[in-house]
């Protein structure tokens, strides 16, 4: 798998796992560790509301959302990714549907590539 494919795989797998997390579909401890294992220790995110969230803040927020949205679905569209030997940049559209409420965000992310995996370093979400 080349580095661009690693990035695309990470984006798709993370969103499948976070959907399972919100729904409470898998073992909480195992899924929590898997979700966090995909992030670089220096990860930061800027939400659609303009708030900056660190990996520490994200890891503290996550437990309170387990099984809180049993019918939420997450769809990823329009992934575009480019990579070098050790870094990558991607953009994609994320659509979350909970009942009749649909939210969309255009995201861009920077990844660090180490060995056989792409790790989230920075994520910016913009509401659309």
Image: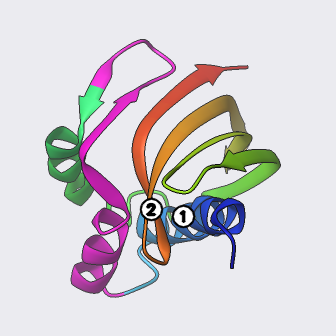
For label 2, the residue is: 22
Q: Residue at x 21, y 81 (%)?
A: 29
Q: In the shown orientation, is residue 41 left or right of residue 87?
A: left
Is residue 98 visible to us here? no
Q: Quadrant of residue 63?
A: bottom left
For label 1, the residue is: 19
Q: Residue at x 34, y 17 (%)?
A: 51
Calculate the distance from the C-alpha at mark 1 to the C-alpha at mark 2: 5 Å
Label 1: few (<14), some or many (≥20) within 10 Å? many
Residue 73's spot in the image, x, y percent? 66, 59
- Closer to the camera in the image, 67 or 30: 30
Above or below for 85 versus 117: above
Disc 2 element: helix
- Closer to the camera in the image, 120 or 54: 120
Is 36 part of what is drawn in magenta? yes
What range is drawn magenta here? 27-52
Residue 89's spot in the image, x, y percent? 61, 40
- Closer to the camera in the image, 46 or 127: 46
Question: Which residue is the extreme one toward the right?
Answer: 78
Q: Quadrant of residue 56?
A: top left
Is residue 73 visible to us here? yes
Q: Residue at x 27, y 71 (%)?
A: 32
Disc 1 element: helix
Is 56 part of what is drawn in magenta? no
Q: Residue at x 51, y 20 (%)?
A: 48
> Pointer 1 and pointer 2: residues touching (CB < 8 Å)?
yes
- Closer to the camera in the image, 97 or 37: 37
Above or below for 125 versus 110: above
Question: Which residue is the extreme one toward the front?
Answer: 85
Q: In the shown orientation, is residue 95 left or right of residue 51?
A: right
Q: Quadrant of the C terminus?
A: top right
């Amino acid at each position: 798998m080349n580095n661009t494919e690693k990035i695309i795989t990470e984006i798709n797998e993370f969103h499948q796992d976070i959907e399972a997390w919100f729904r409470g579909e898998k073992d909480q401890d195992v899924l929590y560790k898997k979700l966090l294992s995909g992030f670089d220790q220096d990860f930061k995110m800027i939400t659609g509301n303009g708030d900056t969230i660190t990996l520490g803040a994200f890891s503290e927020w996550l437990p309170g959302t387990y099984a809180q949205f049993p019918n939420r679905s997450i769809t990823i569209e329009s992934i575009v990714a480019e990579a070098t030997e050790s870094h990558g940049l991607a953009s994609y559209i994320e659509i979350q549907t909970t009942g009749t409420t649909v939210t969309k965000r255009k995201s861009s992310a920077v990844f660090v590539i180490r060995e056989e995996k792409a790790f989230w370093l920075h994520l910016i979400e913009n509401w659309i």
